Amino acid sequence: MSKDRIRQFIEDRIHSDGLFETGIEGVRLFRSTEAVPCAPVVYEPSVIAIVSGSKEAALDGKRYIYDESRYLCCPTSMPVEAGTPQASKENPLYGVYISLDPRLMTELAVEMENVGSPRFAKALSSDSRGIGLADWDAGFAEALLRLLELDKDPVDLAVLADVRIRELYFAILKGGAGHFARLSFGVGNAIARSIAYISSNLTEPLSIDDLATRAGMSRAAYHRKFKAATTMSPVQFAKSMRLNQAALKIAGGMTVSEAAMGVGYVSPSQFSREFKRMYGQSPRRWGEAPQALAMLN
C-alpha cells in the first residue's frame, strides 16, 4: 500500500524529531515523538499529509484533526494555532509537508476549469473555509509516493521532479480538496490574491476600501466574500496574522518590542493588550515559556 511505503520511506531517512529537507524543492519530511500543545503559527499555502499519528490545527475556534485518513489543505496563508498533542514515543507522528507553488496550482486549476469536466466536481464539506481536510485517495497516495521515491536517484530527481510535482498537484486538485483549492487558485480568485497581499504587507496601514478596489468589489461584497473564505473579517485576519507572526518572532529569540514593530505595531502597550487577549498571556511570559515550535507547519 502506498501510504505504508511512504511511512517506511520517512522512517528510513529521519531518526530524530523535526522538519527535514528532501532533495525535492518544497517537500519536507517530519517526525515528532513529543506532545506539543497548540501554539500560534502561520500556515503558508501547503498540503500536510500524515502517515502515522495525528496533528491538530485551529482556525477562528474551529478545530481540525488530521491523520493517516485525512490530509490538510491550506491553499492560502492562514493564521492558526497548531500542535501535536497526541504524539509520543509510543505513538510517533510521521508526515510530509508539501509547499504549494501558487503559479503552478493556478495554471493547473485554470486548465481543469477550461476542460469543465463534471468528474472534477468533488468537494469538501460546504463549511470548509481557510483550511480544510480531504480523505486520502489512491491518486494522491500514489502521486506522493512516486514523487518521494525520486530522492533515491539523482538522475531521476533532476529529470522527473517537475513532472512528478505537477502530477501531485493534479491529484490534489482532482481529489477531495480539489473544489476547495480551486476556489483559491482558479479563475476569479480575487480573495486569494487579497489574502496574499495582506500577508505580504502586514506593516502597512489596512484600508478596506483599497482592498475592495483591488479585488474589484464593493466594500460590502468584499467583506462578505472575505469572511466566507476565511471565517474572519479582513481586519480580524490582518490582526491574527500580525500576532501570529509576532509570536513566531518572539519564539525565535526576538524581543517583544522588536517583534511588535516588525509586524506593524506602533504602540507596544496596544500590542501587549491584543496579544494577551488572543493568547491568554503576555507576550513576554509567552516567550519565556517552553514553546516546542520545532514543528512550525
Image (cartoon, helix red, strand yellow):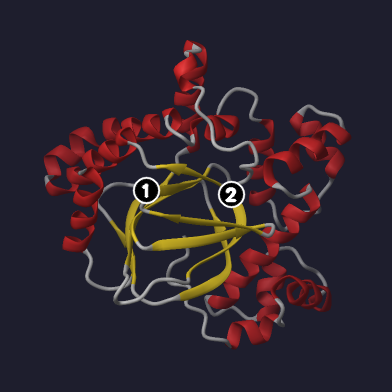
Instruction: State the image coordinates of residue 196 (x, y, percent, origin top left).
Output: 63, 43
Residue that appears at 54% across and 80% down: 253
Left or right: 20 with respect to 152?
Answer: right
Q: Which residue is mark 1?
A: 26
The label shown at residue 199 is: none
Instruction: State the image coordinates of residue 84 (x, y, percent, origin top left).
Output: 45, 68
Q: Quadrant of residue 104?
A: top left
Dot 2: element: loop
Q: Is 47 located above or below residue 111 in the figure?
A: below
Q: Is 84 located above or below residue 79 in the figure?
A: below
Residue type pointed to by label 1 = Gly
Residue that appears at 78% across and 27% down: 216
Instruction: State the image coordinates of residue 159 (x, y, percent, origin top left).
Output: 19, 33
Q: Residues within 10 Å of mark 1 (few under 14, many from 20)?
A: some
Mark 1 or 2 closer to N-term?
1
Left or right: 263 with respect to 2?
Answer: right
Q: Residues within 10 Å of mark 2 (few under 14, many from 20)?
A: many
Q: Is residue 111 something one can see in this rendering?
A: no
Residue type pointed to by label 2 = Ser
Quadrant that contains the N terminus: top left
Instruction: State the image coordinates of residue 163 (x, y, percent, origin top left).
Output: 28, 30
Q: Which residue is mark 2?
A: 77
Report how far apart the C-alphas of labels 1 and 2 lie in the structure: 15 Å
Q: Is 294 located above or below residue 124 in the figure?
A: below
Left or right: 160 with respect to 67?
Answer: left
The residue lying toward the viewer, choosing from 8 and 273, is: 8
Residue that appears at 75% across and 59% down: 239
Q: Is residue 117 something one can see in this rendering?
A: yes
Residue that appears at 46% across and 35% down: 176
Left or right: 270 with respect to 9?
Answer: right
